[in-house]
Amino acid sequence: MKVLAFLAAAYVALLTPDVATAGMLAQAQQYNGLHEVKNNKRLRTALGINPARTPWCGHFMGLIARKAGRTPPQSFGIARSWLRFGAPVKLSYARPGDIIVVRTGRSYHVGIISALSKSTAKVIGGNQSGRVTVSQFTRGQVVAVRR
């Protein structure tokens, strides 16, 4: 009986991150195309802030994490706070659904990997050109990948 309990726990521990990250990607895709001005009322209600006045990539990720049954970092509205979310993953092992933190100049941005190539990461996130959309970042901009 103890062996079965151990195997069940191992199974859940190994599969839970995959299910959770896939769930986050699916949740984010449901908001794809929403614009911070054109869809302000819907985004304001969902995020709890006015996205036309506040940097909102971290707020969007907080919304998505909660909808996927995960607990966002305490300061989820700040993109850098996502450096402590979940478990670290080497970029070479990253996959769609993983959380990615990138550096853009002196600022940070957080989103969810939707696709990877040898040189770029396609990321779905909020506050990308004022909307929820997929944007492309170079692998050199990647600061962290979390699962």
Image (tube, rainbow, N blue to C red):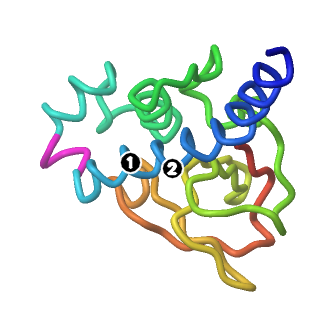
Disc 1 is placed on an element classified as helix
Residue that badge 2 annotates = 22
**Residue 144 pos. (x, y %):** 79, 50
Question: The C terminus appears in which quarter of the rendering?
Answer: top right
Specify whether residue 93 is painted magenta.
Answer: no
Query: Residue lying farthest bottom?
Result: 118
**Left or right for 141, reference 32:** right
Query: What is the spatial separation of the Cα atoms under label 2 and label 1, in whole angstroms?
Result: 10 Å
Please report the bounds of the magenta region as a residue range: 35-39
Image quarter for residue 122? bottom right
Disc 2 is placed on an element classified as helix
* Residue at x 63% of width, y 47% of height: 99
> Disc 2 marks which amino acid?
Ala
**Residue 43 pos. (x, y %):** 24, 34
* Mark 1 neighbour class, 10 Å CA radius: few under 14, some 14 to 19, many 20 or more: many
Question: The N terminus appears in which quarter of the rendering?
Answer: top right
> Disc 1 marks which amino acid?
Ala
Is residue 120 shown above or below 5? below
Mark toward the start of the polypeptide (2 vs 1): 2
Taking depth in this image into account, of 85 and 5 the one nearest to the observer is: 5
**Residue 71 pos. (x, y %):** 57, 19
On residue 101, which mark appears?
none
User: Main structural element of the magenta stretch: helix, strand or loop?
Assistant: loop
Is residue 125 shown above or below 80? below
Residue that badge 1 annotates = 28
Is the Cβ of the residue at disc 2 closer than 8 Å to that at disc 1?
no
